[in-house]
């Protein structure tokens, strides 16, 4: 049997410069350079800083990925790059570099959707995705529930956040608790020492909201509720129980996410739930999703934490699926599309 195609993926949509190399479903290299520390003092990603960091990191990260996979650019069969959604300037660096490599080495180029790549990465850990599946994508920029009939052909959005993304809520709450950036991993750790004893609101779960927003999320009310609760303690001169607040906030987010994801599976008669995006690294989310899914015979697939946050392997994984499905490469003038819709998995040829 001939070797499966060797696909290289380039990711620069936010603050991670990622280059991954896969063969079929097998991960050969996953090189990453992060500018996260340069953004920490601003409490969020600064687009201009991220773009410059990508420009500096891209070539060395490419070299590390090729070395790690023990291949050369000439060996690669196709290049995939995140075309969107993401920060326009950051995307431009990756897209321009990918075009340069594709032209120089005469390789087909696929401009791919970052969110679909967060779903595809799971195949590197758990093999082919049973379809249809429900995908829940929870990151710093997005919180979506999707019905995946055929990942290479488009996905059907079922719902999304109507305000803050789940990761954004973690980052903002961490900031108001003075815990640092990015907030998700810190709250996850801090919550481990606390108890979820404070009843924070669960957005868009009341009966009156379900008709219009059954599979949508809202986290800004929760963030405000945490802020008010902390302010009230401070006004009364009481210490703020940071671990309990973290655990209670985390529980509220994970409760809503898992309840809606399972509801989506049951409504659509789907037995596989795949969770992706940075928030999928959350330890409580993983446990709660497993617990609730098991009750309904639903299989939960969550990649290991390093593959949940942004990386190049996810882009290579989606590229590999597209090549295997015989999808035509993108045209060489493919754009960096900061608002690329989920209905578009790759840029047409
Ligand atoms: O997917 P990602 O790396 O980048 C985006 O595309 O946004 O997600 C980053 C987000 C951040 O908001 C970060 O706080 C959150 O994922 N995150 C977590 C955890 N690890 C990262 N949130 C909760 N728990 C975690 N363990
Ligand atoms: Zn992401």
Image: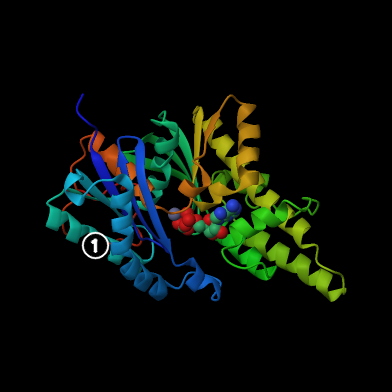
Residue at left 83%, top 69%?
Answer: 233
Residue at left 66%, top 67%?
Answer: 179
The local secondary structure at tag 1 comes to helix
- The answer to whether residue 90 of the structure is visible from this angle is yes
Direction from residue 314 to residue 169 in the image, left or right: right
Horizontal and vertical percent position of residue 28? 34, 42
Horizontal and vertical percent position of residue 79? 23, 49
Residue nearer the viewer, 191 or 226: 191
Direction from residue 252 to residue 270 in the image, left or right: left
Count of picture labels: 1
Residue at left 64%, top 69%?
Answer: 175
Looking at the rendering, which quadrant does residue 198 occupy? bottom right
Q: Quadrant of ligand 2?
A: bottom left
Direction from residue 139 to residue 330 in the image, left or right: left
- The residue to which callout 1 is attached is 97
Q: Is residue 273 above or below residue 170?
A: above
Horizontal and vertical percent position of residue 253? 64, 51
Looking at the rendering, which quadrant does residue 149 occupy? top left
Looking at the rendering, which quadrant does residue 156 occupy? top left
Q: Quadrant of the N terminus?
A: top left
Q: Is residue 150 above or below residue 59?
A: above
Judging from the image, the colouring scheme is rainbow
Residue at left 74%, top 53%?
Answer: 248
Direction from residue 155 to residue 275 in the image, left or right: right
Residue nearer the viewer, 130 or 97: 97
Horizontal and vertical percent position of residue 296? 61, 26
Q: Is residue 115 above or below residue 262?
A: below
Could you classify mark 1 by the number of other residues whose Cα lies within 10 Å: few (under 14), some (14-19), or many (20 or more)? Answer: some
- The answer to whether residue 165 of the structure is visible from this angle is no
Mark 1 CB lies closer than 8 A to ligand 2:
no
């Amino acid at each position: 049997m001939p070797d499966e195609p060797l696909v290289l993926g380039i990711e620069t949509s936010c603050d991670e410069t990622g280059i991954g190399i896969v063969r079929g479903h097998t991960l050969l290299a996953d090189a990453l350079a992060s500018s996260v520390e340069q953004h920490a003092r601003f409490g969020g990603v600064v687009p201009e800083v991220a773009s410059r960091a990508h420009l500096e990191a891209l070539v060395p990260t490419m070299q590390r990925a090729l070395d790690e996979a023990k291949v050369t650019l000439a060996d690669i069969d196709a290049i995939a790059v995140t075309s969107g959604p993401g920060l326009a300037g950051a995307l431009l660096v990756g897209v321009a570099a990918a075009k340069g490599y594709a032209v120089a080495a005469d390789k087909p180029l696929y401009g791919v959707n970052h969110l679909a790549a967060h779903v595809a990465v799971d195949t590197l850990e758990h093999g082919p995705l049973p379809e249809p599946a429900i995908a829940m994508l929870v990151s710093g920029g997005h919180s979506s529930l999707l019905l995946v009939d055929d990942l290479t052909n488009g996905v059907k959005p079922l719902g999304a956040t109507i305000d803050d993304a789940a990761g954004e809520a973690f980052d903002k709450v961490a900031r108001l608790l003075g815990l640092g950036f990015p907030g998700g991993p810190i709250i996850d750790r801090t919550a481990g020492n606390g108890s979820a004893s404070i009843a924070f609101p669960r957005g868009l779960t009341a009966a009156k909201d379900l008709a219009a927003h059954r599979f949508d999320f809202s986290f800004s009310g929760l963030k405000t509720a945490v802020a008010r609760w902390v302010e009230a303690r401070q006004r009364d001169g009481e210490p703020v129980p940071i671990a309990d607040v973290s655990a209670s906030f985390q529980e509220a987010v994970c409760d809503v996410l898992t309840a809606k994801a399972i509801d989506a599976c049951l409504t659509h008669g789907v037995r596989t739930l795949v969770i992706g995006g940075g928030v999928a690294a959350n330890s409580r989310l993983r446990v709660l999703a497993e617990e609730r899914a098991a009750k309904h015979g639903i299989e939960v697939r969550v990649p290991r934490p390093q593959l949940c946050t942004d990386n190049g392997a996810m882009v290579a994984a989606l590229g590999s699926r597209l090549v295997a499905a015989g999808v035509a490469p993108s045209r060489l003038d493919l754009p960096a599309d900061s608002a690329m819709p989920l209905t578009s998995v790759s840029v047409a040829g």
